[in-house]
Amino acid sequence: MPRTILSEDKLHHAIRSKVADHHRDIVGEVQTAIANNDVVVVGMRQNPVVKKAKKALDAAGVAYAYLEYGSYFSEWRRRNALKMWTGWPTFPMVFVKGTLVGGGEDVLKLNESGELKQLLG
């Protein structure tokens, strides 16, 4: 099922570049990490679910790049650009071979089922 996103033709021409460039730097950083690493975890300080996901990947022996953007009290506007880009509402965001596989619980399930190793194979 495709996610609903406002069509560009429904954006007034005067604001299209503002929408396209909104925190483009953070999105670009994540895109570069995804292009250069099999597994990327995007997280934030103080988030226990991010720590769980990283711990599960460590226990499985899966190497990953980790990008951290602020905490509950900082950089939320920048992180919001990632939520808008992916459509994923929470952190962490875990990418495997360029595909967003979800968050912490999703990584745990993929690891337990053996699918994580298959995706990396």
Image (tube, helix red, strand yellow):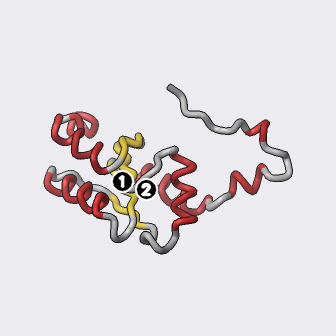
Name which residue lies at 35% across and 56% down.
Answer: 41
Question: 34 or 60, which is in the foreground?
Answer: 60
Question: Residue 42 at what x, y percent from top left?
Answer: 40, 58
Name which residue lies at 51% across and 46% down.
Answer: 86
Q: Secondary structure at mark 2?
A: helix
Q: Secondary structure at mark 1?
A: strand
Between circles 2 and 1, the one closer to the viewer is 1
Q: Is residue 98 above or below residue 76?
A: above
Name which residue lies at 34% across and 44% down.
Answer: 96
Question: Residue 71 at what x, y percent from top left?
Answer: 42, 71
Q: Which mark is residue 90?
A: none
In the picture as drawn, the residue positioned furthest to the top comes out as 1
Residue 44 appears left or right of 29:
left
Q: Image quarter for residue 21?
A: bottom right
In the picture as drawn, the residue positioned furthest to the bottom comes out as 73
Question: 94 or 65, which is in the foreground?
Answer: 94
Question: Residue 83 at what x, y percent from top left?
Answer: 52, 52
Residue 105 appears left or right of 83:
left
Residue 35 appears left or right of 118:
right
Q: Which mark is residue 40?
A: 1
Name which residue lies at 48% across and 56% down.
Answer: 30
Task: Classify 10 Å Cα crowding around label 2: few (below 14), some (14-19), many (20 and above).
Answer: many
Q: Which mark is residue 33?
A: 2
Residue type, mark 1 in image: Val
Q: CA distance from mark 2 to mark 1?
A: 7 Å
Residue 63 appears left or right of 84:
left
Q: Is residue 99 above or below residue 32?
A: above
Q: Image quarter for residue 10?
A: top right
Q: Is residue 99 above or below residue 103?
A: above
Which quarter of the image is occupied by the C terminus? Answer: top left
Residues under numbered marks 2 and 1 in contact, where contact means CB atoms less than 8 Å apart = yes
Residue type, mark 2 in image: Ala
